[in-house]
Image (cartoon, rainbow, N blue to C red):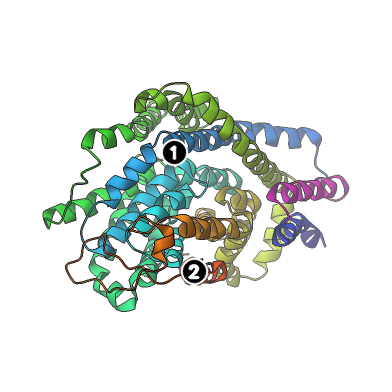
Amino acid sequence: MNAALATLPILVTLGLLAAKVRALYAALAALGTAGGLTAVVFHTPLAELGEAQLHMLPTLVELAGILFGGILLSELMSRTGAQARLGDRLGGASGPQSRAVLLVVFGVTPFAESLTGFGIGVVVAIPLLRRLGLAPAKAAVVGLLGLVTVPWGSLAPGSLVSAELGGVDFQELGVVSALLSAPVFLVCGAAALAVAFGIRRAASAAGELLLATGTLWLTVWAVNRFIGVPLAGVLGGLAVIAVLLLVSRLQERTNSPAAAPGEPVRRALAPYAFLVLGLLAGRAALTAASIEEGWWTVIAGPAGWLLLTTALTPRLLGVADEILPDAARSALSRWWQVTLTTAIFLILGTLLTVTGMSREMAEACAALGPAYLLLAPWIGAAGGFLAGSNTGANAMFAASQGAAAHALGYPALQLVGIQNVSAALASAGSVARVVLAAELATSTPGPDGSAAQAARQPKREPAPGDTATAVLEEPRTAPDTGHILRTVLATHAVVFLLLGAIALLWR
C-alpha cells in the first residue's frame, strides 16, 4: 500500500505533463502531493526535512548560477554576432558532406550544448545543416540527434543532481556515463547519416563515423576520468572539430571563407576560451585544496566562472558594455521560470529520498528482480521526454533508481549512470525541442540564401567530388513535426534497448 502511495507524486507529475500542463504547475502539484503524503503517511521529523534541504542548498544555488550564466552567455553571443561568425566559419569548411555533417553532429552541437544547454546546440546546428544543403525535415532530425552529450549540458548540472540524489560520487558518475554513451554516439551518428544521405551513402562514410564517435567517446571519458565532469562535453566537441578539420586539411580540401578573416573568429571564441581556462584553473584549485562540496565549489566551479565570463564577454568581444544590462534583463525573464521549475523538482527529489518514498518504490520494483534492469533506461527516458530536461528527470527518478539498485544488490553507480544517460538522451526528443527544431529548419535559409526559393530547388545528387556546400534541397513544405518526433524516438528506442541489455549483463 505504501509503495503505491509513494508513486503518487511521480504519477501526478507524469500525468500533468502528458496532459500538456506546464512543467512549473506539474512540479508544484507533485510537491504538494508529496508534502501531503509526508504529513499523513510518511511521517518525518521537521528537523530531518530541514537538514536535508539545507544540505541541498549549495547545489541549488550552483544550478541557478549555471542556468542564468548559460542563458546570458548565449544571449550575448547572439546579440554581438559572434555566434553567427563562428557558424559561418565552420559552415565554410569543405570536404565530403558526410564529414561536414559529422562535424556539426559530434563537434559543434556537443560543444554548444555542453556550454549552454537548453537545446542551444540545436539552435546552432540546424542553420549550419541547412547551409550544408539538408532539406528542412532532415536538418531538424539530424540536429536533434546531435544532442548526445546532454549529461554534460550546461556544464553538467543534470549529472550533479543525479549524483546527489542517487547517492554516488559525481566524478565516478561522469566516468560511467561516458562509458555508457558509446552506444548513444554510435547509434545516433549512424542514424544521422542515414537520415541525411540514405543508408548506402551512410555506409560508405562508416570510417569517418567511427573516427568521429571514437574521438568524442575517448575524449569525454578521458576528461571525466582525469580532469572533471563539467568540461567533458565541451572538450569532446572541440576534439571532434579539430580531428575532422585536420583530416580535411590533410586531404587538401579546405576552403578559407573570404568574408571571415581569422581574427574576428578568434575573438568570437574568446569568451569560450576564457570560460574553459577558468574552469580548468578552478578545478585545479579545488583539487589542491581537497574541496569536493560546499560553497567554495559554487564560487570556483561552473556557476562562478560562467557568471564571471558573462560579465567580461562584452570586453572580450570588443563591444560596448551597454549591451550587458539589456541582455541580462532578457536572460532573466527566461531564467526565473526554468530555475523555479528545476528547484521544485530538486526539492521534490530530496523529499522523496528523506521521507523514504523512494525506498518504498524501490522495494516494490526490486520484486521484479533482474527484469527491472531492462526497464531502468525506459524509466529515465520517460522523465527526460516528459520534463524535457535531464536535470528535471534526474530530480524525479535518480533517487528511486539508486534505491532500487541497493534493493536489488546491484551497483548503484551503474544504475544511476543508466538513468543519467537515458534521461539525457530522451530530453533531446521532448516535444518542446522537436517543435523548436522544426521551426528553425523551416525559417532558416538553405545554401541559396533564401528560404522561399529553396522550395523550388530541384533535387540534385552530388557528384563524388562535391564539397560540403553542395545542394541537396528537395521540393518542400514545412516539415512534419510528427515525422520528426517519430524518427528521433525510434532512434532513441534502439539505444534504450541496448542500455537495458548492458544493465542486465554489467553486474
Place of residue 165 in the rendered image (x, y in percent of width and height, measured from the top left): 61, 46
Query: Which portion, as a residue range, is magenta?
Result: 21-42
For this rendering, which residue is in front, 151 or 78? 78
Instruction: Let me know if residue 38 is in the magenta part.
Output: yes
Q: Are marks 2 and 1 in contact (CB under 8 Å)?
A: no
Place of residue 62 in the rendered image (x, y in percent of width and height, measured from the top left): 55, 33
Q: Residue furthest bottom?
A: 200
Element type where label 2 sits in the image: loop
Is 462 located above or below residue 78 in the figure?
Answer: below
Q: Residue furthest right?
A: 40
- Indicate which label's residue lies in the foreground, 2 or 1: 2
For this rendering, which residue is in front, 55 or 154? 154
Q: Residue at x 18, y 51 (%)?
A: 255
Asked if residue 388 lies left or right of residue 451, the reply is: right
Magenta highlight: main SS: helix
Instruction: Let me know if residue 218 is in the magenta part.
Output: no
Q: Residue at x 55, y 37 (%)?
A: 67
- Amino acid under disc 1: Ser
Q: Residues within 10 Å of mark 2 (few under 14, many from 20)?
A: few
Is 267 located above or below residue 468 in the figure?
Answer: above
Disc ID at residue 477: 2
Using the rendered view, name the quadrant where residue 406 is placed. bottom right
Q: Which residue is mark 1?
A: 78
Q: Residue at x 62, y 70 (%)?
A: 369
